[in-house]
Amino acid sequence: MGQPKLKPNPKTPNSRTQRGLSQQAILISFASVCVFLAVAYGVWALSKPPEPLTAGMPGVAPAVEVPTVGAPSVLPTVEAPTMTVGVPGVLPAVEVPTVEVPGVEGSASGIAELRSKPHLVFRSTAYGTSSGLMSVVPLDNPSATRMLTDLVCERAYITREHGLCLDDVSAHIIDADMQIQHTIPLEGFPSRTRVSADGRYAAMTQFVSGHSYADSTFSTQTNLIDLANNSVIANIEDFEVWRDDTLFGAPDFNFWGVTFAKDSNTFYATLSTDNKMYLVLGDISKGSFTVVHEGIECPSLSPDNTRVAFKKKMDTPDDQLIWNIAVLDLQTMEETMLAETRHVDDQVEWLDNDHVMYGVAEQNPTQGIGDNLWVLPADGSGAPELFVFKGNSPTVIH
């Protein structure tokens, strides 16, 4: 394909190599220990062979069984190769399968044909050569062989006409052919991104300190991009904030999780201050926010603009950090908890007005390491169903 795979450039002035090497090493080591603890516990707790996973969504995509590790239709060989994970002196070494998922390199014409119909764009989390590649599948058959592009992203949101692909050091503006048109340097580690429905604006959030929302000392920067001229037009920390008709401000303000309304001038986001989270309504033309509701993180506006799906911090007996998914009715301000009890650290995508889609880190070590995409009714009923095996950062295009 025309565009080579993107590779982080260690000489880039804004690369992470110039941002506190010792701090980064500590944070990465801490994150690695957490990951390995979860994997080791899952291996220890597993007492029977995994059952096949069911993928699909009633009325949207036919239900299919996604084979477990070792099935020929998922892996090229009967037995999956493994990799050893562990922390010397902390965790014993354990073997974890490296799960590969079939994919085909897409031609320009093939990708264009697939993207002319309802489809899903997502980031592959499968092990091997497809890891990190933006991929495309038909929306009515998400278990079909994924078509691989040559875009390598950590986070992405790619609509039919425009997109934003964030790698470790840059934000790449993407055109309708999924080719890079312009690049903007990042100041930190990529976290969230969204593009307005009309393709006018994009938003990107990056950690300027810390690498996770679970880090009590993290700091974010969220910029708005005008896609008409490929330029950053605002850091939303510069917007005025109003609460109860009074100007509201504090030195510890952090913003993230932008989600655009239909008119694109209007958007919602999360404001964090004094250990509290608020849903705020932004107006680009006025450069201002209005506080709407408390306790909202990573909002995602429904297609009909009447509800916001978000991750809600749960109270646990041992003070463990757990986020579950809830939906806020913007007219009544009533919250509905959805039928997902696992920890979800993601900005939800809406499959349609009745279902949400989100990524969950794999909790069954026999399925290998990597997020999967799940769908769930948005009214609190039903149960999670697997939609895409080994994927995250989805964009639904109807």
Image (spheres, rainbow, N blue to C red):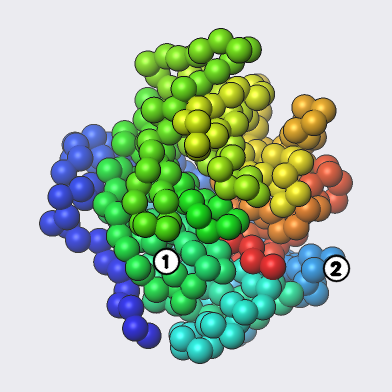
Reading the image, the residue beneath label 2 is 59
- The C terminus lies in quadrant: bottom right
Q: Is residue 24 above or below residue 8?
A: above
Q: Report helix, strand or loop for mark 2.
A: loop
Few, some or many residues within 10 Å of mark 2 (<14, 14–19, 20+)? few
Q: Is residue 300 above or below residue 94?
A: above
Point 42% across, 58% down: residue = 228
Point 76% across, 49% down: residue = 304
Q: Position of residue 224 (x, y in %)?
A: 43, 44
Residue type at numbered disc 1: Ile
* Residue closest to the far front: 285
Q: Nearer the viewer, residue 264 or 317?
A: 264
Residue 105, visible in the rendered structure? yes
Count of numbered circles in the view: 2
For marks 2 and 1, give the one nearer the viewer: 1
First in sequence: mark 2 vs mark 1: 2
Residue 211, visible in the rendered structure? no
Name the quadrant containing residue 230.
bottom left
Name the quadrant containing residue 4.
bottom left
Q: Is residue 171 above or below residue 260?
A: below
Reading the image, the residue beneath label 1 is 174
Q: Nearer the viewer, residue 344 or 273?
A: 273
Q: Report helix, strand or loop for mark 1.
A: strand
Q: Position of residue 31 (x, y in %)?
A: 39, 42
